Amino acid sequence: MKCCNIAIVNKIYKGVSFRFLTAILLVCAGLFLPLGKCAVHAEEIAAGTMEDGVGAEAQDGFSEADQEPIVVVIDPGHGGKNLGGEYEDYTEKEMTIVVANAMKEELEKYEGITVYLTRNGDQELDLEERCEYAKSVDADFIFCLHFNLSAYHTLFGAECWVSAFGENYSKGYSFASVEIDMLQDMGLYSRGIKTRLNDKGTDYYGIIRHATERDIPCVLIEHCHLDQENDKPFYDHNEKLQDFGRLDATAVAKYFGLRSEILGVDYSNYQNVHVDVPSHVVAPDRTEPDICMIEVTDQNTETGEVTVQVSAADYDSGMLYYTYSYDNGEHFSELQRWPDKSRDTFSFTLQVPPRVMPQIIVNGYNGFDLYTASNMISLPSMDYETAEEIAAKQMAQRALESISKTVVPVKKEPVNISVTRREPEEEADKPVSFRYFMTVCIVCALLVLAMTVSMILIIRGTKRKRRRRRKRRPKI
Ligand SMILES: [Zn+2]
């Protein structure tokens, strides 16, 4: 009985274990099937073979966010002894930390995202350390925050630098498109989204190079130029730097399709720019614009205004700025925005001073700040009066009028005044000289009189003396 019981128990045990094993196998199969699918999906994304490319991943970012948050690393440029750009009272390392803190604070208002900073104070970190840190937190993206300076303090505007390689290029470019669009909406001029290579043919910017080595997409944002008046209104206050931070955060939220209940926004349907994963290195443009020609379409000899039509093109990086000269290239204007980057031809009007023979040249700059000089056009000089000259003339005229207004009444007043009681005061000149003359005459007359009288008296006195002597003389 005991054995029988044991046999039955064994049978039951075997039966149960078989069923149990089968159930486990079925559960496992059910579990592994979707996992396998995810793995394939991930491989497809990594290989860049999915139809949607970057856009798809960005959209997937939110759908996966319920389970696994997006991890981003914000890298405030420079720090410690590495000050970054310095101009007037502005130091780049101090500005980037303000932007970064505002960006982190704003991004943390979104759901499904974890945000890290490479530095939260004035620490000095090398570029590789920053990327190593991003790798350690399993970052999906690194956003590097910077401000720009140019050698001659001439350039202005915002630009984004991205890796020149594969998926890091396409992801970087896709995010940078959102960022640059928003910076443009803010009023900054877009200097574009660019790549740059070093002598070894790898990414020039260390942070992008090290991030690419670790397979982390990375965008270096140069918000604007610290040394240019055009850009100054965008960074001259801490509040404005925080605006940059909030803008950067919104660009990230759009790119990853995030939602925020706190902010009441939902970017889950935001459409990123689709960028194909390039099969080759996306090299920067190293050549000047292909063409730059000018034509004078109007010359106003009365105002000195000359209208110039510019036709220029760069088939690699497009046109960015232009400058003009009316003295055969001796002096050029400040850089001007290219009016419409989608068009190669536009017209502008310049002012040529009078009595100068205009010799007009235009330099057209491409997206990489390389320029091509146009043909030169000579025009006859214009003998017109400048606004300043006209104003000076008018001022002189007014001054003359006001003088004549004040002088004429003075001349007329004596006429009136001669009739009025102010005569003695106003005609002081004539009576004084008359009185003086009369006084002198009287004095002279008195003197003459006195002299005459004294002469008479002297003569009379002498006669008396003679008479007395005659009387005293004894008569012989
Ligand atoms: Zn910098």
Image (spheres, rainbow, N blue to C red):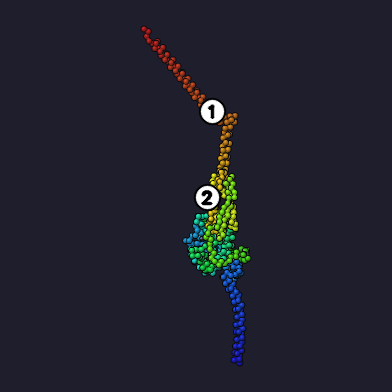
Callout 2: CB less than 8 Å from ligand 1: no
- The residue nearer to you, when weighing 247 against 295, is 295
Q: Determine whether, in the image, residue 9 is placed left or right of residue 90.
A: right
Q: Quadrant of the C terminus?
A: top left
- The answer to which quarter of the image holds residue 23 is bottom right
Residue 7, percent across and down?
Answer: 60, 90
Q: Secondary structure at mark 2?
A: loop
Regarding residue 441, the answer to whether it shows in the image is: yes
Amino acid type indicated by mark 2? Asn
Label drawn at residue 328 = 2
Residue 268, percent across and down?
Answer: 62, 66
Residue shown at 57%/39% (left/top)? 397
Label drawn at residue 430 = 1
Q: CA distance from mark 2 to mark 1?
A: 68 Å
Q: Secondary structure at mark 1?
A: helix
Mark 2, other Cα within 10 Å: few <14 / some 14–19 / many ≥20: some
Regarding residue 91, the answer to whether it shows in the image is: no
Relative to 25, say whether 247 is above or below. above
Label drawn at residue 273 = none
Relative to 203, say whether 453 is above or below. above
- The residue nearer to you, when weighing 106 against 425, is 106
Residue 207, percent across and down?
Answer: 51, 64
